[in-house]
Image (cartoon, rainbow, N blue to C red):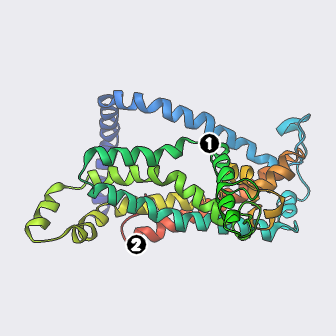
């Protein structure tokens, strides 16, 4: 009897399988326009994101431009370039600087856009809200070269406006851009300023998606603005906050090469030199591509691990990305 039931189930599964396949093909054809729009994005990622991954293998080779990727000999031992990086006398300093600058940017850069979006959402004067929003997301389009020029004009020890005012008061000029005491603060605050308005756009879009009847019901119950923000707005954008935090954790090893490379100098190396700038000097300027690839792979593995762990933790509260 049990054998007959098993045969019957097996037959039913064999019949359903082609039916599911036909159903899947029908749905694919039904949404063909949507899949066609998706195609350029998929092709872009295949060509510019997945195909270049082939170059990772030079991290395990003594790469030579003349011999090419396939012709270059394998490194002996296979982790030679990783060990070169780990045994470098600068490894601890580079890792510490990278983690600290990234954590500072994450800690001090995550909250301001949320608060700014909440304030903008509460603003009832339309033209004022648009003006403030435009002025705050304009810095996002400035390059770090321009921003450094602005900082130089304001904070330079010899000719900066702030230091001229300080000297005029009879005090000593402060070396903001060449002192290890101030460099990280200026680095983090300038990035927060650049991305404040741009980051708030995402949260404003999430707030716009909250059901307005929730606010009307709360208003009828006598809730004030602060109570509605706490009980409706913040829970409504919680999933977006968690998602952005998880995505930023994936870039915890990217402390911002472009910004630091433009702004740092030899006086602030102890607090500003990160893995990317070291790789640029040691790996790329000296044509040691294998070392640069090994460090890049090391960073990618740490970033992927952090994203997986953060997503796992977020799923406990039901807010994971996948």
Q: Quadrant of the C terminus?
A: bottom left
Residue situated in front as seen by the camera: 60 or 155: 155
- The residue at the point 82 percent across, 60 percent down is 82
Relative side of 135 to 281, left or right: left
- Percent across and percent down for residue 154 are 64, 54
User: Marks 2 and 1: in contact by CB < 8 Å?
Assistant: no
Write down the quadrant of residue 160 in the picture: bottom right
- The residue at the point 36 percent across, 67 percent down is 318
Relative side of 237 to 137, left or right: left
Q: Regarding mark 2 in the picture, which secondary structure is present there?
A: helix
Write down the quadrant of residue 168 in the picture: bottom right
- The residue at the point 43 percent across, 33 percent down is 38
Observer able to see residue 306: yes
Would you name the residue on which mark 2 appears? 316
- Percent across and percent down for residue 9 are 29, 54
Observer able to see residue 11: no
Q: Which mark lies nearer to you, 1 or 2?
A: 1
First in sequence, mark 1 or 2: give its number. 1
Q: Which mark is residue 255?
A: none
- Percent across and percent down for residue 292 are 80, 51
Would you name the residue on which mark 1 appears? 143
- The residue at the point 66 percent across, 69 percent down is 100
Per the model, the C-alpha gap separating discs 1 and 2 is 39 Å
Relative side of 104 to 74, left or right: left
Q: Quadrant of the N terminus?
A: bottom left
Q: Residues within 10 Å of mark 2 (few under 14, many from 20)?
A: few
- Percent across and percent down for residue 198 are 46, 49
Q: Regarding mark 1 in the picture, which secondary structure is present there?
A: loop
């Amino acid at each position: 009897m049990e054998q007959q039931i098993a045969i019957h189930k097996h037959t039913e599964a064999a019949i359903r399988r082609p039916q599911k396949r036909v159903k899947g093909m029908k749905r694919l054809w039904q949404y063909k326009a949507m899949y066609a729009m998706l195609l350029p994005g998929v092709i872009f990622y295949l060509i510019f994101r997945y195909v270049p991954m082939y170059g990772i293998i030079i991290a395990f080779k003594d790469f030579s431009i003349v011999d090419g990727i396939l012709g270059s000999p394998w490194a002996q031992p296979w982790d030679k370039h990783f060990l070169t990086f780990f045994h470098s006398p600068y490894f601890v300093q580079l890792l510490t600087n990278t983690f600290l600058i990234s954590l500072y940017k994450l800690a001090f850069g995550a909250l301001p856009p949320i608060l700014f979006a909440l304030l903008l959402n509460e603003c009832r004067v339309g033209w004022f809200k648009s003006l403030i929003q435009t002025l705050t997301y304009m810095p996002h389009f400035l390059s770090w070269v321009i921003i450094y020029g602005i900082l130089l004009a304001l904070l330079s020890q010899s000719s900066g406006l702030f230091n001229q005012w300080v000297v005029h008061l009879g005090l000593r000029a402060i070396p903001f851009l060449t002192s290890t005491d101030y460099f990280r603060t200026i680095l983090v605050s300038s990035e927060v300023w650049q991305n404040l308005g741009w980051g708030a756009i995402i949260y404003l879009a999430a707030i716009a998606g909250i059901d307005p009847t929730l606010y009307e019901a709360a208003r009828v119950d006598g809730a004030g603005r602060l109570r509605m923000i706490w009980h409706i707005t913040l829970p409504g954008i919680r999933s977006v906050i968690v998602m952005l935090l998880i995505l930023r954790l994936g870039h915890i090893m990217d402390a911002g090469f472009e910004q630091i490379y433009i702004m740092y100098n030899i006086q602030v190396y102890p607090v500003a030199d990160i893995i990317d700038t070291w790789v640029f000097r040691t790996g790329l300027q000296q044509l040691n591509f294998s070392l640069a690839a090994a460090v890049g792979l090391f960073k990618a593995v740490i970033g992927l691990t952090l994203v997986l762990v953060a997503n796992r933790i977020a799923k406990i509260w039901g807010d994971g990305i996948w």
